[in-house]
Image: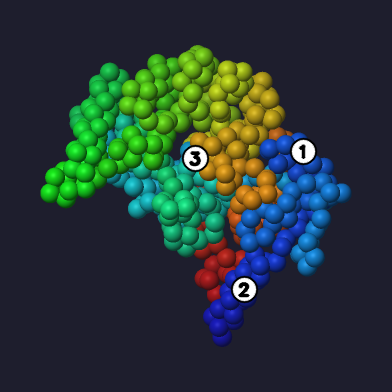
Amino acid sequence: MRRTIGCLVLTFCFASLSLAQDTPQAYIGARIIPIVGVEIPGGVLIIHQGKIVAVGPARSTSVPAGAQRHDVKGRVMMPGLVDTHSHIGGVEGADSTAPIQPDVRVLDSINVRSPGIQKAQAGGITTANIMPGSGHLLSGQTLYLKLRDGSIIDDLLIRDAQGTIAGGLKMANGTNSRKAPPFPGTRAKSAALVREQYVKAQEYREKIRRANGDREKMPERDLRMESLVEVLEGKRTVHHHTHRHDDVLTAIRLAKEFGFRIVLQHVSEAWKVAPEIAASGFPVSLIVLDSPGGKLEAMDVSNRNGAVLEKAGVLTGFHTDDSVTDSRHFLRSAAFAVRDGMSREKALEALTIAGAKMLELQNRLGSLEAGKEADFILLSGDPLSVYTKVLETYVEGKKVFDRSDPKDLLFATGGYGASRGDELHLDGFDEEGE
């Protein structure tokens, strides 16, 4: 009987979600931070079928007849946060057999039932670039995910208009990948190994071009080279772990030599080479720490990086590198950067639209604008205040986190191991799913 009742409740929940998507939803009275444009006190956000229909002041934004109204006075609303570098979901990448493994896909290793996904929702993160680790020169293909509630990886995938799964490629340099053979022992050898593989990828691509569709002349299929060719052709962005100023310049040098797109990740010593980064035209995704230390090559990390890069004109975002920064505390990255000189405007952009640009998703998310996907969060106060809490998180118009729900509150406030890794996020059910 209990299971029968549970099934009926589950059916009702999904029916309610479907009805909510079919009925326009109007969120009225919040202080809206749209990111693009000025803040709107007492604003209105209207969504329908997962998309933003309108956003603006109450006096000039009409609510459609029949829309379901939500009173959010006293709250602050802003776009869902974009984490450009995360390791949630128990993700795994390359193994110890080689330093460069571009054929490895994190698609095949992410556990979407991991509590890390829901803890990220509790932090207001709605989009994340899930990456393998940095112990290799190239550790595999990354995956851009929408943090929807889901039971399999397909439920969280982001696809383009052609149905291609969105993602990049993870590379690294510095001390992490310097180990005993077959790994390189020096920085110079690290760069040499990378150059060698991209030269091979150029040759592989040329063989395909010369074959001109003739299957008899096509080279033997090589999954490693296929991934690198996607990088060379601009179909896949490299997300490059790098800390020390000389490593940063090496990453830029390789990207320029082979003509691929790159996002510089971490960049602890960005303040030392900001003009060079600006001249490269490449964006930076910063790690902002509240307790620096732990790695010798990051000893000169500075929370002034955001301000320095802003002044230099570099597109700058933030990331958690979860669990380096707990996803639930992502807003603090902007607060620390502002405290050290970054403007409020650029710090909030760094949490949202800047990250969307780095993932080439800026036409779909990262700001509250008509036509974009309805990813947004409701806050108890100003996003830069230490006292502010994420109250609700929405992905494409569906609520995925509600602090007033006891289960969600556990994800928001619980310590390590506060929730089971295989528990499906469904309101109204006990631990047994009954």
Q: Is residue 232 visible?
A: yes
Q: CA distance from mark 2 to mark 3?
A: 33 Å
Residue in the image at 36% along x and 27% along y: 259
Quarter occupied by residue 40: top right
Q: Secondary structure at mark 3?
A: loop
Q: Is residue 258 above or below residue 222?
A: above
Q: Nearer the viewer, mark 2 or mark 3?
A: 3
Q: Which residue is mark 2?
A: 15
Q: Which residue is mark 1?
A: 39
Q: Which mark is residue 158?
A: none
Residue in the image at 68% along x and 25% along y: 343
Counting from the top left corner in percent of width and height, residue 410 is at 61, 55
Q: Which residue is mark 3?
A: 359
Sequence-wise, the earlier of marks 3 and 1 is: 1
Q: Amino acid at mark 1?
A: Glu
Q: Secondary structure at mark 1?
A: loop
Nearest to the observer: residue 330 or residue 194: 194
Q: Quadrant of the C terminus?
A: bottom right
Nearest to the observer: residue 95 or residue 203: 203
Q: Secondary structure at mark 2?
A: helix
Q: Quadrant of the N terminus?
A: bottom right
**Does residue 324 appear to the left or right of 405 in the view shown?**
left
Q: Amino acid at mark 3?
A: Leu
